Image: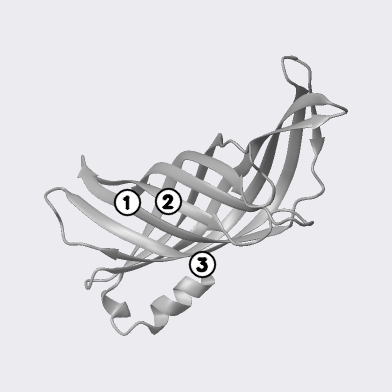
Amino acid sequence: MLFVMLIAALTPDRAEAQVKGIIHIGVAGSSFRGGALENAMPIYRLSGGAGLRYSYPSGLELESGLDYSVKGAELEGTFEDIPIEGTSEITYLSVPILIGYRWHTMGRLRPRVVGGPALAFKTDSRISYRAVGSGIEQTTIDDGIGERDLGWIVGLDVDTMVGGETLVGGLRLTLGQSNARTVEPEVLNTTVTAFVGIVF
């Protein structure tokens, strides 16, 4: 957020900028890519966050904040010739630094495209195992997860006025660029988030 505030301060038309807060909640579908993962399936978890948005008359917007998300995947494998299903869940707090462009009002809708980096910090990582067809599950801490995950975000969202309040909804794609694990082969996070929120 400090980086966005610095950019905002150095922008020539900063005196005309509107500073607004935003709170959002959504559902994130996440999976792994890369490595030798042929059977990775997505998991779906709640996500959310809050931040600040700087809006300029030209349509340029800068946004940053603090987001909560759970990334990971459902995996299949074998242990001593027994088919095993596993679920990897990695909890992150991330700081996105987004640059966006908003078009002029199209009726009651104001669409916007955004993009930029996000640095995520791991707060917890767990993996659950169960034998295929068995109801017995074992959960343990996964120590093989990296502490940080740098990714790129692209997204599309829309603002609209409802009862005097500005509501926002949209989609974000986050492509992790850091190895999610501490060993090779490299495994990268991929997350799609659908969200709704309020701008105030």
Number of the label disc, if any, that sits on residue 117: none
Secondary structure category for the residue under label 1 = strand
- The kind of residue tagged 2 is Arg
Q: Residue furthest right?
A: 80
Cα separation, mark 2 vs mark 1, equals 8 Å
Whichever of labels 3 and 1 marks the residue nearer the N terminus, that label is: 3
Q: Is residue 156 left or right of residue 7?
A: left
Residue at numbered disc 1? 157
Residue at numbered disc 2? 172
> Residue 36 at what x, y percent from top left?
69, 47
Secondary structure category for the residue under label 3 = loop
Residue neighbourhood size for the residue with mark 2, other residues' Cα within 10 Å, grouped as few (<14), some (14–19), many (≥20): some
Whichever of labels 3 and 2 marks the residue nearer the N terminus, that label is: 3
Q: Residue furthest left?
A: 107
Residue at numbered disc 3? 1
Does 121 appear above or below 7? above
Cα separation, mark 3 vs mark 2, equals 19 Å
Contact check, label 3 and label 1, Cβ < 8 Å: no
Question: Which residue is at 52% across, 47% downward?
Answer: 191
Residue neighbourhood size for the residue with mark 3, other residues' Cα within 10 Å, grouped as few (<14), some (14–19), many (≥20): some
